[in-house]
Image (tube, grey):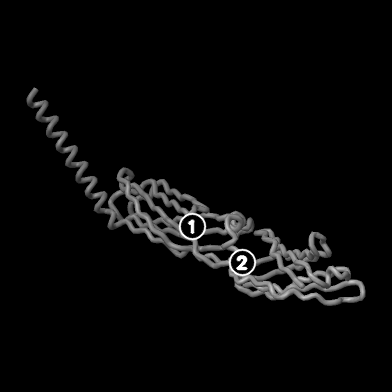
Amino acid sequence: MNISIRMIGIATTVFWVFLLAFAFSAVYSVKDVQFHFGEPQVGVNADNQLYFSLPISLANRGFYNIGHFNVTSRILDVNGSEIAHGSTFVRVINKGEEVTAFHNMTLDISDLLQRSQFYLFNDSDLTVREWVGLWLAEVIPVQASTNFTLPWGAPLYNFSVGQTTVSFYNVTHSRIAVPIGFENHALFDVVGAFQINVYNGDMLNGEGRTDVAVLQHNRYDGLAEVYVRNSPAVTTSGRVEIYFSSSVFNYGPWVIPYG
C-alpha cells in the first residue's frame, strides 16, 4: 500500500513538473510569436459603404501551435459611441508557419451621417480599438490591444451660401440665384442635386434643381438657380430653401432669406 501511495505521489509530482515546464516553455515562446498590423486600406464600395481592411501578419516561430487567433475591432465616433464592429478568426497556426489574415469591416456612410450632421461639414478622426487574442499551444490564452485612428473627410467641408440675388430674366419671369460652395474631402465623389424652393410666406413661388458632381478632394463653386413668374411678392422679399440629395446622403433644408 505504501509503495502504491509512493508511486502515485511520484507520478503526481512528475505530472505537475511536466505541466509547469510545458506552461513555462509555452509562455517563453511568446517572444518568438510575432504579429504586425499592416497599413489599413480604406475606401468606398459599390453599396456606398466605407470599407476598412487591415492586413495582419503573424509568424509562429515558437515551440507550439497557436489556436483560436482572433481579432476584434470597434470603430467609435467622436463621442465614443460604437458605429461599427467586426471580428476575424483563424482556427490554428502551426509552429513554423507564417499567416497573413485580412481583417475587414464596413461602415454604412448614410447611417453615420444620419447619426450626426457634424460629419457632413467637418473633418475628423474615427477611433479604432483592436483586440488580438490567441491560445499558445492551443491551451494558454494571451491577449493584446491597440488603438489607432481613421481619418474622416467631410463631403461638404466649408459649405457656404452666398448672397441671394433676384434679377429680371424676361417680361414674364425673374431669376433667383444662390451661390453655393464647398470642398469634397470625402473618400467618395459627391454626386447629387440641389433642390431649390422659393417661398413668399407660405406660398411656393418656384422651384428648381441643380445637378452636381464633385470628385474627391475637389472644390465646388456654383449657382443654384430658380426661374419664377414675375410678381411683387417675388421681387420684394421671401426665403429660399435648399435641399441636397444623393445616393449616399440627404440633407436640408438650408433656409436663406432674401430681400
Q: Quadrant of residue 12?
A: top left
Q: Quadrant of the C terminus?
A: bottom right
Taking the image as shown, residue 114 lies to the left or right of residue 233, namely left
Few, some or many C-alpha atoms within 10 Å of disc 2 (few <14, some 14-19, many ≥20)?
many
Q: Could you tell me which residue is drawn at 43 percent across and 49 percent down?
A: 90
* Quarter in which the N terminus is drawn: top left
Pick whichever, 149 or 207, lies toward us.
Answer: 207
155 displayed left or right of 16: right
* Residue 193 seen in the figure: no
Question: Where is residue 32 shown, x and y percent of the image?
Answer: 29, 57
Check the image and name the residue furthest to the top.
Answer: 1
Q: On the image, numbered disc 1 is attached to which residue?
A: 79
In percent of the image, x 31 and y 48: which residue is there? 136
State the image coordinates of residue 74 (x, y, percent, origin top left): 47, 53
Which of the two discs, 2 and 1, labels the residue nearer the N terminus? 1
Outermost residue, left side: 2
Q: Is residue 21 above or below residue 186?
A: above
For badge 2, the amino acid type reads Pro
The answer to whether 114 is drawn above or below residue 237 in the figure is: above
Taking 6 as reference, is 108 above or below it? Answer: below
Q: Circle 2 sits on which residue?
A: 155
Amino acid carrying label 1: it is: Asn
In the displayed structure, does residue 147 sit left or right of residue 255?
left
Circle 1 packing at 10 Å, graded few (<14), some (14-19), many (20+), is few
Identify the residue at image location x=70%, y=72%.
180
Name the image quarter holding residue 239: bottom right
Tags 2 and 1 in contact by the CB under 8 Å rule?
A: no
Work out whether residue 151 or residue 48 is closer to the camera in this orientation and state it: 151
Most foreground residue, 13 or 74: 74
Residue farthest toward the right in the current orientation of the protein: 171
| Marks 2 and 1, how far apart at CA | 20 Å
- Circle 2: element type: loop
